[in-house]
Amino acid sequence: MDSVLRRMGEVGLVPVIRLESERTAVDLGRTLIRGGIPVAEVTFRSAAAPSAIRAMAAEVPDLLVGAGTVLTVAQAEQALAAGARFIVSPCYPEPVVDFCLGQGIPVLPAVNHPDGVARGLAQGLEALKFFPAGASGGLGMLDALAGPFGAMRFVPTGGINAANLGEYARRPQVLAVGGSWMVPPALVDAGDWPAVERLCRDAVQALHGFSFAHLGINAGDEETCRSVAGALTGLFGLPAREGNSSIFAGDRIEVTRRPGPGERGHIAIRCNQVERAVAHFAAAGVTARRDTARSAKGRCTSIYLDLEIGGFALHLLQA
């Protein structure tokens, strides 16, 4: 996959931004970085779009900035000249797609039916915008498109907010999710950057959907494992569930038969997409232990982070 699209997928969110003036562009770009969303789609619904893109590209180099609502080749040319690194359209303008492919620039034309996806595949595209997502059947339509078009990735946009973001983010066919709820124009125009940063951070948490799965206790051997699990099940009336490598006392406590990662055990955390969470933590300086990764159907479903807290390793699990 193209490096720009790969980076977009690692971040998982694409703020859709309309700027009436370039004066707020740099401050907004820096706020997105602080809020954990180093991506910006600046729409061509405003005459300030080219200058805003130019300012962001020049002054916020860590920001992946692109152009949205691109309808014509002339607009695409303006966007690329300003420093845009990807192009997004609310429809499927073939001249724009052809131009971007010729320039080697990622382009995300919008589709909401099988014929559009087939057109994208025929042109060699790896990802498409799914728009308007909510009005086009939402998750049901997205799931339906994923069946016959399993190789295609989508950026659903329209009708998505913090409340339903997690459901979209969990889908393997979703490259990233687009929206404007984390960059409301009123806050941007007012320069209320702390409020925008809070919305961005909230969106990042909703994207990943981190939640406690279970606590793992390293027993170290069969006898100790049975003793610890038996004490927990006996004291609290928790049902015992035996596996090949551990015994669960209820759903939230795992007692391992053999020593595993972590001096004392592990804390398992569910998330919407493991690989995206790995990229999220890598940006914070916490790497993953690739030797512990497990996959199913070509998708990473669990992995340990190279970090212990209180003697417990951190284990990410696919929700």
Image (tube, rainbow, N blue to C red):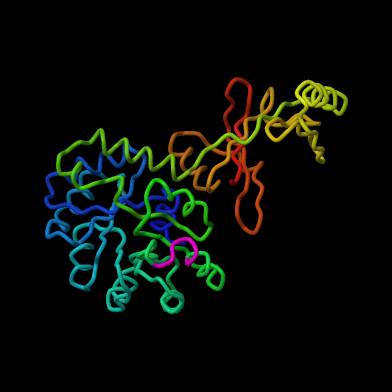
Q: Position of residue 120 (x, y in %)?
A: 42, 74
Q: What is the tally of numbered marks visible in this picture? A: 0
Please indicate whether residue 81 sits to the left or right of residue 156 in the image: left
Image side of residue 208 versus residue 20, left or right: right
* Vertical side of 259 occupied by 8: above or below: below
For the stretch drawn in magenta, the main secondary structure is helix
Q: Could you say where residue 182 lies in the image, as x and y percent from the top left?
A: 30, 45
Could you tell me which residue is drawn at 47 percent across and 48 percent down?
A: 166
Q: Extreme right residue here?
A: 223
Is 258 within the magenta? no
User: Which residue is at the front of the view, 54 or 206?
Assistant: 206
- Residue furthest front as drawn: 237
Identified at 20% across, 48% down, the residue is 185
Q: Is residue 139 magenta?
A: yes
- State the residue at coordinates (19%, 62%): 44
Q: Position of residue 83 (x, y in %)?
A: 23, 57
Q: Residue at x 72, y 26 (%)?
A: 217
Q: Is residue 62 left or right of residue 218?
A: left
* Spot occupied by residue 71 in the image (x, y as percentages of width and height): 23, 71
Horizontal arrangement in the rendering, residue 270 relative to residue 20 (left or right): right
In this rendering, the answer to whether 267 lies above or below 29 is above
- 247 is higher (above) or lower (below) than 60: above
Q: Is residue 78 above or below residue 260?
A: below
Can you tell which quarter of the image residue 248 is in? top right
Give the magenta range. 136-141
